[in-house]
Image (spheres, helix red, strand yellow):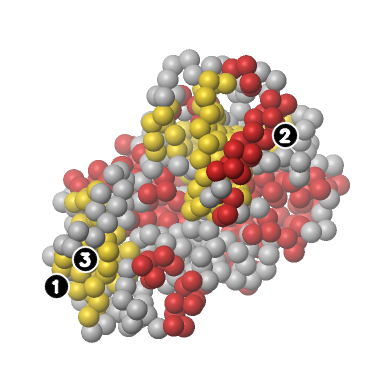
Amino acid sequence: MIPSKVLIIGAGVSGLSTAALLANENISSIIYEKSSSVGGRTSTTIHNGHILDNGFHIMPFYKKSKIYEILEKINMIEKLNLVNVYDIAFYDGDKFHKYPKGIIDILQLTLIPFNSRLSLLRILLPMAFTSIEKTEQLDKTSLTEVTKKLDNASKSFFDAVCMLAFADTAENISLGEFTRTIIRANPFKGGTSEFAYPDMGGYDRIAKLFAEYSIKKGSKINLGKQVKKVEVENDKVKGITLTDGQFVSSECVIVTFPSYLAVNQLFDDDVFDKHFLESVNRLNQTTSVIEVHFALSKKIDSRQIVFPVGQNYISKGIFFISNITSSVSPAGEHLMMVGTPVHAEEAKSSKRIREITEKMKNELNIIYPEFQRVLLWERPKAWSLVESVVKKPGLVWKNKMPHEVPHIKGLFFVGDSTVSYGIGTDSAAHSSILCHPKIMSYLKQ
């Protein structure tokens, strides 16, 4: 017998993906979200008429992505207009170089000398044609093990790929996770190196579409409602208690915000044993970034993404959002975002945020001499949890938080900090897909 209420904590991509997959099986859910809007870490804000994303988000692998797979499954793909993100380049302090979309493109990559391109291919080709299963043997190895002997130009290629794929630097990436990304992006083996972004403006359009579908099928989303505790009795879920004291009974609760936060914040001390908590807390390896949105009165580049390469640049990624879709900005204005990964302490320091913002502006003025003259306003932000995908060696893929805790019936964990592979929101959607059969099996018991 299926319980009358399935409760989902969190209305981000993973929570709403899970709700949509359940709704597709005619199972409604009640979703509790502490914020005033859906989207989680992909939520947007409006500032001076511009739609600003919380971090730069992108749909990797486009039609091969797990988000796209869910949209197809619920027959909603036609309701989401997506545009290709294809015009990507490196900038080496002298000129721009086209970002390679496939393995063969590397042979024409002007960023690095020809002999270095061959060395790069010798590393990437075996990756591209291995299997997902074999990559698990590389999960405990750092990506830098294969890049440390390369020349600086070749290393800059890996730095740019890591920034686009993981919003982080190579030393923080597992070789296994990097290899899985190359496999999925290999156009010679059924993959795609395409990226996509909602044409309607704002990456949270994806979450809103999942929400629309779930509500249409009978689910309910409670915004501004924070969960205080998941109630567990005799190793079985009994429901949740909200911060306002309200108790909601349920035999099935799905937690979709970072597991290492949830196990410490939402449960009584005796629910999980010490060894389990220690293993989950190891996953608290988040990505922190400082990003600055700049509004311009003139388009200063027709490209969509530019990666300044080399150790001298603090700006690791320049994202021309309004070149991807004009719907994010008022007519006649242009929006760009510049980001750089930082230590968590820096993301909390207003002084450090101001310093980095000024350095970014100086760099942009050198790359684009018109920048300062056409700048309308700037909006710096720092995120200590821009994503919770664990990418460090030994902590990825199947070593992340399991979807189920064996001794607690009716409790499930979903999200990018749980068992899944992929990049950012794609990892969150993959987690929902992997967990869905487990939830259905329990509900049917």
* Residue placed under numbered mark 1 in the picture: 1
Disc 1 versus disc 3: distance between alpha carbons?
A: 24 Å
Would you place residue 390 above or below residue 57 in this image? below
**For this view, does 395 lie left or right of residue 314?**
left
- Residue at image location 24% in from the left, 73% down from the top: 231
Few, some or many C-alpha atoms within 10 Å of disc 3 (few <14, some 14-19, many ≥20)?
some
Contact flag, marks 2 and 3 (Cβ < 8 Å) = no
Q: Nearer the viewer, mark 1 or mark 3?
A: 3
x and y percentages locating residue 409 in the rendered image: 27, 78
**For this view, does 159 lie left or right of residue 233?**
right
**For this view, does 44 lie left or right of residue 292?**
left
**For this view, does 79 lie left or right of residue 371?**
left
Assign a secondary structure to mark 2.
strand
Task: Tell me which amino acid carries mark 1.
Answer: Met
Q: Quadrant of residue 432 in the image?
A: bottom left
Lower sequence index among marks 1 and 3: 1
Few, some or many C-alpha atoms within 10 Å of disc 2 (few <14, some 14-19, many ≥20)?
some
* Residue placed under numbered mark 2 in the picture: 91
Assign a secondary structure to mark 3.
strand
Disc 1 versus disc 2: distance between alpha carbons?
A: 59 Å
Q: Quadrant of residue 241 in the image?
A: bottom left
x and y percentages locating residue 267 in the rendered image: 32, 73
* Residue placed under numbered mark 3 in the picture: 241
Disc 2 versus disc 3: distance between alpha carbons?
A: 52 Å
x and y percentages locating residue 166 in the rendered image: 57, 52
Lower sequence index among marks 2 and 3: 2
